[in-house]
């Protein structure tokens, strides 16, 4: 069964959010995705994720409130799981 590891970087100053996210990705167990709470869209991170073989999905929940789901791009089960979790985030 897929797992989700939560990481809140919303109070960190650059470049700490990217450093923390990349560190957690290196520590992830198989069948685990990363859910990141952030205050803005980390555009430079997205190219790193693609180069490293990760997919991501962003959900904007409000001003300065963003959730990013990150999983290995070849894991369809985790992709579906992350999209389901993201749809729950945006429900009222």
Image: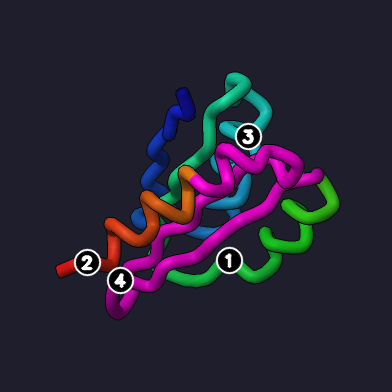
Rendered location of residue 81, percent (x, y) = 47, 43
Label 4 close to label 2 by CB (< 8 Å): no
Q: Say which mark, if any, is on residue 91.
A: 2
List the residue tagged with mark 1.
Answer: 42
Whole-number angstrom distance, CA of label 4 to CA of label 2: 10 Å
Which residue of the protein is positioned furthest toward the left in this rendering?
A: 92
Our reading of the magenta stretch's main secondary structure is strand
Relative to residue 30, is residue 72 depicted above or below? Answer: below
Relative to residue 74, is residue 14 depicted above or below? Answer: below
Image quadrant containing the C terminus: bottom left
Magenta stretch holds residue 68: yes
Q: Which residues are magenta?
A: 53-80
Q: Say which mark, if any, is on residue 61.
A: 4
Label 2 close to label 3 by CB (< 8 Å): no
Rendered location of residue 25, percent (x, y) = 63, 34
Q: Point out the frontmost of discs 4 and 2.
A: 2
List the residue tagged with mark 3.
Answer: 25
Whole-number angstrom distance, CA of label 4 to CA of label 1: 15 Å
Q: Point out the frontmost of discs 4 and 1.
A: 4
Crowd class of label 4 (few under 14; some 14 to 19; many from 20; radius 10 Å) = few
SS assignment at label 2? loop
Crowd class of label 3 (few under 14; some 14 to 19; many from 20; radius 10 Å) = some
Q: Quadrant of residue 29?
A: top right
| Label located before the other in sequence (4 or 1) | 1
Nearer-the-camera pick, 18 or 37: 37
Magenta stretch holds residue 39: no
Label 4 close to label 1 by CB (< 8 Å): no
């Amino acid at each position: 069964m897929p797992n989700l590891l939560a990481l809140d970087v919303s109070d960190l100053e650059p470049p700490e959010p990217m450093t923390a996210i990349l560190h957690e990705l290196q520590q992830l167990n198989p069948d685990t995705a990363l859910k990141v709470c952030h205050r803005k869209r980390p555009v430079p991170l997205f190219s790193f994720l693609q180069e490293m073989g990760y997919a991501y999905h962003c959900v904007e929940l409000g001003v300065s409130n963003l959730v990013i789901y990150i999983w290995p791009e070849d894991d369809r089960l985790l992709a579906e799981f992350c999209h389901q979790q993201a749809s729950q985030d945006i429900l009222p």
